[in-house]
Image (spheres, rainbow, N blue to C red):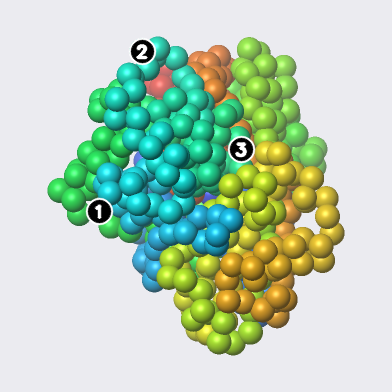
């Protein structure tokens, strides 16, 4: 009689869970993979909305391309990759939009001439930033916030006006609360190796010139929803949607996942590709010490206002991918010129913009009704861009508690969570290892590798 196949249950069918399922099947086709998703669709935060007859991303719009995981997943699924038609980021200032220097990793100039001349900050702010070249490097090896590092080296003005907007945009958090080690460990490494963030930026650009770096961001053909659909369809048996994993309990062979439908799904290993709060609820008493640590990963709510304008408006937008804004300067924390970066036949000559709203300290904006939010964003855009005061079509997508906050000590906290989870339980996703699509794919694949190794080890034990 044939031995039953090893079974792994993946909870969550966002891009993390889908990547984990795909990896499991790739490394060991004999593993029986079940994917459970509470919602009636796959993709998690990757979602689009139709605005004026155009499909516009309401979640991430592109893939970070300097790390390979997401691009390689696209290739494995036979999905072509497209480059942006325009790059470059602008900063919202009281005098209008100011473009960031073109050679400025993380917004930090790699040429001293840009520090002397860039109009995004005052002369006083520029002089203070140059002190980075002589300020002693930090001796402590403990984690610190992005803000603490930037303020000590470059000063408050550069931190608040120029760097906080661009560095905190992916997280929707506070520069003074987010862990530098969990978000931009390169900055910590620059200070350690170069004794200066400016010199670190210079060194990074020298390394980039020696290599052949492609674009920072790319997009899967058909948008990220196409990636999600391809990943889901590649799973034998597909994804079981509208089925919430309600509890995880010890069982035979090792675990059983009880669903809200009263079903019990047996598993040798479980990958929880969900947020920290959902992982804590799922694990219940089995979480042990990890449960208290999971509770220490907070979230904030964010939203996006999607706007399309009449024909002929796209050409008036500055060349670039969009702008970011200092906290409190505008209800918009960041704006993507989607039609400029990713032009399409559907958009034609219409300007299509994505405005991020909410995040730490600005969550109350999401309590306004759709009309108020759309009007506020449109008025602020018309003040700095050659656009009508009202869009031709608009939509608002709110994402309550969608943005995990990587507070100081996050990397160590995640290590403690993983170190105290019961055998056969693995966590993955944006609550732990990075909020962008590429980080989520890599997180899911790493969890899959660990789960596959675990079930192989228990198989060997069973046959001894």
Residue identifier under label 1:
213
Contact? badges 3 and 1 (CB < 8 Å) = no
Q: Earlier in the sequence, mark 2 or mark 3?
A: 2
Label 1: how many Cα within 10 Å (few below 14, some 14–19, many 20+): few
Q: Which mark is residue 139?
A: 2
Q: Give 192 or 387, whichever is nearer the viewer.
A: 387
- Distance in Å between CA atoms under marks 2 and 1: 32 Å
Residue identifier under label 3:
173
Please say whether residue 318 is visible from this viewpoint.
yes
- Distance in Å between CA atoms under marks 2 and 3: 26 Å
Vertical placement of residue 392 versus 155, above or below: below
- Distance in Å between CA atoms under marks 3 and 1: 29 Å
Q: Give 207 or 135, whichever is nearer the viewer.
A: 135
Residue at x-position 28% and y-position 35%: 200
Q: Secondary structure at mark 2?
A: loop
Contact? badges 2 and 3 (CB < 8 Å) = no
Count of numbered circles on the image:
3
Q: Quadrant of the C terminus?
A: top left
Label 2: how many Cα within 10 Å (few below 14, some 14–19, many 20+): few
Residue at x-position 77% and y-position 50%: 365
């Amino acid at each position: 009689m044939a031995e039953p196949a090893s079974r792994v249950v993946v909870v969550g069918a966002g891009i993390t869970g889908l990547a984990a399922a795909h990896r499991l099947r790739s490394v060991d086709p004999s593993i029986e993979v079940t994917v459970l998703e509470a919602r009636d669709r796959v993709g998690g935060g990757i979602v689009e909305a139709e605005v004026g007859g155009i499909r516009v991303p309401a979640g991430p719009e592109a893939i970070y391309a300097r790390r390979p995981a997401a691009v390689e997943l696209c290739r494995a699924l036979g999905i072509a990759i497209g480059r942006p038609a325009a790059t470059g980021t602008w900063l919202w200032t009281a005098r209008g939009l100011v473009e960031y220097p073109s050679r400025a990793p993380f917004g930090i100039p790699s040429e001293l001439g840009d520090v002397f001349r860039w109009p995004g900050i005052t002369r006083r702010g520029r002089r203070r930033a140059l002190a980075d070249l002589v300020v002693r490097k930090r001796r402590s090896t403990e984690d610190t916030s992005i803000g603490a590092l930037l303020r000590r080296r470059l000063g408050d003005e550069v931190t608040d006006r120029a760097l906080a907007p661009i560095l905190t945009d992916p997280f929707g958090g506070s520069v003074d609360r987010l862990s530098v080690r969990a978000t931009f460990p390169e900055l910590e490494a620059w200070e350690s190796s170069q004794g200066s963030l400016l010199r670190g930026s210079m060194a990074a650009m020298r390394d980039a010139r020696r290599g052949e770096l492609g674009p920072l961001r790319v997009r899967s053909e058909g948008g990220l929803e196409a990636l999600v659909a391809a990943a889901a369809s590649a799973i034998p048996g597909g994804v079981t949607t509208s089925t919430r994993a309600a509890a995880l309990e010890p069982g035979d062979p090792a675990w059983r996942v009880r669903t809200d439908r009263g079903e019990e799904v047996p598993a040798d290993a479980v990958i929880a590709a969900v947020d920290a709060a959902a992982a804590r609820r799922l694990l219940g008493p089995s979480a042990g010490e990890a449960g208290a640590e999971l509770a220490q990963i907070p979230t904030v709510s964010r939203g996006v206002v999607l706007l399309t304008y009449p024909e002929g408006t796209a050409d008036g937008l500055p060349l670039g991918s969009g702008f970011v804004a200092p906290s409190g300067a505008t209800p918009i924390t960041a704006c993507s010129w989607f039609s400029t970066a990713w032009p399409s036949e559907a958009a034609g000559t219409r300007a299509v913009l994505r405005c991020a709203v909410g995040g730490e300290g600005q969550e109350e904006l999401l309590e306004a009704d759709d009309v108020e939010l759309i009007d506020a964003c449109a008025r602020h855009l018309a003040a700095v861009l050659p656009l009508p005061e009202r869009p031709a079509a608009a939509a608002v997508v709110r994402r309550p508690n969608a943005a995990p906050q990587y507070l100081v000590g996050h990397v160590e906290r995640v290590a403690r969570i993983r170190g105290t989870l019961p055998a056969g339980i693995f966590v993955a996703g944006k609550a732990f290892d990075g909020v962008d699509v590429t980080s989520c794919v890599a997180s899911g694949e790493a969890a899959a590798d660990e789960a596959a190794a675990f079930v192989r080890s228990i198989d060997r034990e069973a046959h001894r």
